[in-house]
Amino acid sequence: MEKKKLLEKLKEKILMEKLPLKETATNIVFGKGNPEARIMFIGEAPGRNEDLEGQPFVGAAGKQLDKLLNSIGLSIEDVYIANILKYRPPNNRNPNPEEIKAHTPYLVEQIKIIKPEIVCTLGNYATKFVLASFDVEGMKKIGGITYLHGKPVDKEINGLKFKVIPLYHPAAILYRPQLRNALEEDFRKIKELL
Ligand code: URA
């Protein structure tokens, strides 16, 4: 079955599940972009705008992400984007381990469908989850994004090999503009790897 169809089926399956945060959310935020992409981005959780529109990265962080992609000659059409959590946590609070445990099997399914060559993790939660080899308990043992960003790591899942590039979350440059240079530089590394 083609990737687009497999993703649609997976979204339908999630909609049938009673996941944590579903009750308080407006919409599921499943993923967007090109199912045939070589690069997949993984964010943290939907914010207010994403919850209202049912699409990831449509708010202020999304604008930053679009600009960063454009800076290396890419657009949303060249990548696929999904989050750790499929529903918005109230008031954008941090995801808790139970929520991550309940939601991430679907993210793992998305990765297996997309089969990306490069996985860019945005911020601490996505980075720790992927570098802990998709084990929520193992996340505690992974260092912070300040130390990990821009350093590619080889990972695999069920024999599917890919490079992980941990990145600062694009929202971080909104409140810490001094991170912009590091993020832009890390994006240039994605281009070199392609
Ligand atoms: N931040 C994220 O991590 N994901 C989104 O979808 C939007 C903002």
Image (cartoon, rainbow, N blue to C red):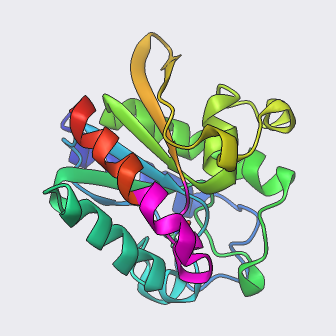
| Depicted 179 relative to depicted 63: above or below | above
Q: Residue at x 78, y 76 (%)?
A: 93
User: Total marks drawn?
Assistant: 0
- Residue 114 in the figure: left or right of residue 50: left
Of 33 and 131, the residue lying toward us: 131
Image position, residue 143 (x, y; %): 77, 37
Q: In terms of image quadrants, where is residue 148? A: top right
Q: Residue at x 32, y 33 (%)?
A: 116
Magenta residues, start to end:
168-183
Image position, residue 62 (x, y; %): 40, 75
- Residue 158 in the figure: left or right of residue 124: left
Image position, residue 120 (x, y; %): 44, 44
Of 145 and 54, the residue lying toward us: 145
Magenta stretch contains residue 8 = no
Image position, residue 168 (x, y; %): 55, 57
- Residue 165 in the figure: left or right of residue 18: left
One can see residue 101 in this view: yes
| Depicted 60 relative to depicted 137: above or below | below
Q: In terms of image quadrants, where is residue 71? A: bottom left
Dominant secondary-structure state across the stretch colored magenta? helix
